[in-house]
Image (tube, rainbow, N blue to C red):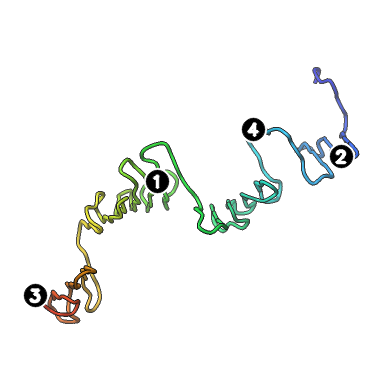
Amino acid sequence: GKNSNLVVNGNTRINTGHGFVDIGPQNGAWSHFYTDRKRYYFNKGITVDEGLIGSYDEHLQLQTAGKTRMILMKDTGNVGIGTNNPDMKFHVSADVVNTDVARFTGANLDRGLVISTAASGATNDAHIIYNADVAGGFHSWRNNNTEVMRLDSTGNIGIGVTAPLATLDIDGNLYIRGTDAGLVINNPSTNQMRVGTNGASDYLVFATDVDVERMRIDS
């Protein structure tokens, strides 16, 4: 342009005795930088005006200290952290024993992680929500955007209940299948109590020590 201090027609090579850099377009679509060195070194940060960084026909890798920390696969678009061969859209692997693989934090009271099988923007599918609030935290399982089960910060599980009052709190029927199936209530310091059916017979048994019948309700 008219304000340029240096105009070069053709490619330019800069040779310092340690290596060279060739600067100039090699075709009608791209502008090129070539060098015989292993890498380019920039002593300052790099700002990309269009915000686009990509690879030509290789996997895109983010490295520190010469080691790949994150990879974006060229064919599948899978992203890997801690692995160079991610087999799904987002694959995180930790190679250090007893180390958290991932941690999610936030400043809001209802912060959390949502895992959904629904399409983007849809709510009518299965969800697993890991959330934290003022009272602690909870895990929530949802279907069609309706919570069906919750594990709260005290260890209580609610099925159809959002504020379980016991280790297992169910709003609805409990269906137990199987021959000799039943509900066993165990106190480690005393004996067990069992409530259930007795084989193929059509009656309900109340027993202690699991199998010592104390009361029966027949058909």
Based on the displayed image, in which of its 4 quarters is residue 12 positioned? top right
Residue at which label 1 appears: 122
Given this view, does label 4 or label 1 mark the residue nearer the observer?
A: 4
Mark 2 and mark 4 in contact (Cβ < 8 Å)? no
Above or below 30: residue 127? below
**Label 4 to label 2, Cα distance in Å?**
28 Å
Check disc 4 and report its element: helix, strand or loop: loop
**Label 3 to label 2, Cα distance in Å?**
94 Å
Q: Is residue 74 left or right of residue 122?
A: right
Given this view, does label 3 or label 4 mark the residue nearer the observer?
A: 3
Q: Give the mark nearer the N terminus: 3 vs 2.
A: 2
Furthest-top residue in this view: 3
Residue at which label 2 appears: 20
How packed mark 1 is, by other alpha carbons closer than 10 Å (few <14, some 14-19, many 20 or more), is few
Q: Give the mark nearer the N terminus: 4 vs 2.
A: 2
Please provide percent x and percent y for residue 146.
Answer: 30, 49
Given this view, does label 1 or label 3 mark the residue nearer the observer?
A: 3
Tell me the tag on residue 50.
Answer: 4
Check disc 2 and report its element: helix, strand or loop: strand
Q: Residue at x 56, y 57 (%)?
A: 96
Furthest-bottom residue in this view: 200
Please provide percent x and percent y for residue 161.
Answer: 24, 52
Please provide percent x and percent y for residue 173.
Answer: 19, 62
Q: Is residue 219 left or right of residue 25?
A: left
Given this view, does label 4 or label 2 mark the residue nearer the observer?
A: 2
**How many numbered discs sit on the rendered protein?**
4
| Residue in the foreground of this view, choosing between 174 and 212 | 212
Q: Give the mark nearer the N terminus: 2 vs 1.
A: 2
**Label 1 to label 3, Cα distance in Å?**
49 Å
Q: Is residue 219 visible?
A: no
Check disc 3 and report its element: helix, strand or loop: strand
Residue at which label 3 appears: 217
